[in-house]
Amino acid sequence: MPLTVKNLTTWFSLYEKIITENKNYLSELDTPIGDGDHGNNMARGVKAVQQSLISKEPTELTDACKQIAMALISKVGGASGPLYGTAFLEMAKKSKETSDIGELLIAAVAGIKKRGNAKVGDKTMIDVWEPLTAKINEGTLSSKDVTEAVDSTKKMVAKKGRASYLGDRSMNHLDPGAMSSGYLFTALIETKEIL
């Protein structure tokens, strides 16, 4: 399905709502295995995205993806800002060739993996982005898939990021970046005209 400026804006508006409602929970998830600030960082980032999209009113998909990327990179602290930002920068580049959401997300996944040097099983946002992007390309993404992808990180030992310093103690904790990524895909499902 094609991604447009209109449905991308709707998608991010829904994402901001979910992040804002769950920012304390995200920070709680981040407390035992990170800095405890993921929720506040993400809330600041999605608010900046909304302000950017409203004030600049992009008319081209490439510009809209770039604005999202820049707002996330400048406002979200830690590793999450550059990783989410890279995802949308790669989508911006790919949008010059296609507006297909599946293809754009494949480009985003490749960018995140390159930037974070992570793969599925490392207990990172990739454990959500990669399998759910595959589901989108199969045309089968469901809320159950999102939950399963996020939950899969609980039993993993972190191999990347701050949580990796904890070794086996990182087990039995959901990855906060996986959870905030899960919210992004939940918002995408709710943006019915995209999928």
Image (cartoon, grey):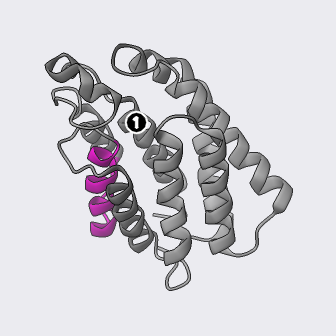
Q: Quadrant of residue 8?
A: bottom right
Where in the figure is residue 67, as x and y percent of width and height?
Answer: 68, 60
Between residues 58 and 171, which one lies in front from this camera angle?
Answer: 171
Q: Which quarter shows the C terminus?
A: bottom left
Q: Can residue 134 be found in the magenta stretch?
A: yes
Where in the figure is residue 105, as x and y percent of width and height?
Answer: 41, 64
User: Main structural element of the magenta stretch: helix, strand or loop?
Assistant: helix
Circle 1 is placed at which residue position?
A: 177
The residue under the point 67% across, 49% down is 71
The residue under the point 33% across, 19% down is 33
Q: Which residues are magenta?
A: 125-142
Q: Can residue 87 be found in the magenta stretch?
A: no
Q: Is residue 47 left or right of residue 76?
A: right
Residue type, label 1: Gly
Where in the figure is residue 120, as x and y percent of width and height?
Answer: 20, 48
Q: Is residue 174 left or right of residue 155?
A: right
Where in the figure is residue 99, as x and y percent of width and height?
Answer: 52, 78
- Is disc 1 surrounded by few (<14), some (14 to 19) or many (20+) residues within 10 Å? many
Between residues 129 and 144, which one lies in front from this camera angle?
Answer: 129
Between residues 115 and 25, which one lies in front from this camera angle?
Answer: 115
Q: Is residue 159 left or right of residue 48?
A: left
Outermost residue toward the bottom in this view: 97
Between residues 64 and 37, which one lies in front from this camera angle?
Answer: 37
